Image (spheres, helix red, strand yellow):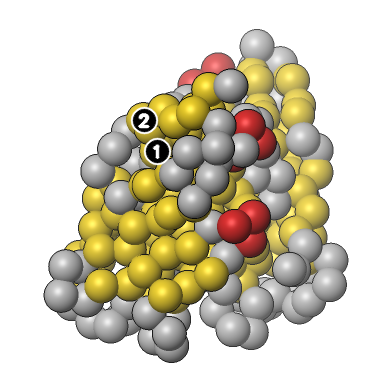
Amino acid sequence: GAVVSQHPSRVICKSGTSVKIECRSLDFQATTMFWYRQFPKQSLMLMATSNEGSKATYEQGVEKDKFLINHASLTLSTLTVTSAHPEDSSFYICSARDNKNIQYFGAGTRLSVL
Amino acid sequence: AQSVTQLDSHVSVSEGTPVLLRCNYSSSYSPSLFWYVQHPNKGLQLLLKYTSAATLVKGINGFEAEFKKSETSFHLTKPSAHMSDAAEYFCVVRSPPNDYKLSFGAGTTVTVRA
């Protein structure tokens, strides 16, 4: 199946700093990528839809200035958590949609904000 | 609108015995349905998908699922559980008009006893 690479797998940062997470589709082009957040023992919550060459579409309640998304190429989307605070600590997962409308997921990034 | 209900939050089976994970969906349109598996601190891996072709779908690692429109169900089965099947399983639905958005069930935790 298609491969999506997400980096880093784990990051620990101080409160107030910004963190960038990368999501790459390795063997296919993805005009659309997605960013999810997962709390412990819970399901995935869609944060935003990332469209190559255009602005991301954010779900209700997600702060677009807090979670900056850039989808500059057909294989790369980035999520930047700006001015991170402890409540932003979570597991963030990206996915990329192929030309058959199937989403393939990255391995996730565990963010811990101290 | 679309939604998914996973009927069991936790399933425990003995190694070598069958596994059944139950999923019911709700959709105003003809849905596409997926089962994903997530191992601890990992991303989601696609097990199988139903996209309006054969109603009995075979996936990876010996899993299969049957789409039953009359029962609005998409239960996941495996005839013989293996220790490596211990993980979290998500039933997911996708349907028009938001044909790119996935709706996730709450997840079922599978434990396998030796």
Q: Position of residue B57 (x, y in %)?
A: 47, 73
What is the chain identity of the residue bearing mark 1? B
Q: Which residue is mark 2?
A: B10
Which residue lies most toward the bottom here? B53
Quarter of the view holding residue B50? bottom left
Q: Position of residue B20 (x, y in %)?
A: 38, 47
Relative to B113, A7 lies left or right: right
Q: Which residue is mark 1?
A: B108
- Which amino acid type is marked by label 1? Thr
- Mark positioned earlier in the residue sequence (2 or 1): 2
- Secondary structure under tag 1 reads strand
The foreground one among A57 and B93 is B93
Q: Is residue A9 above or below residue B76?
A: above
Q: Residue at x 36, y 30 (%)?
A: B10
Q: CA distance from mark 2 to mark 1?
A: 5 Å
What is the chain identity of the residue bearing mark 2? B
Quarter of the figure that contains the C terminus of chain A: top right
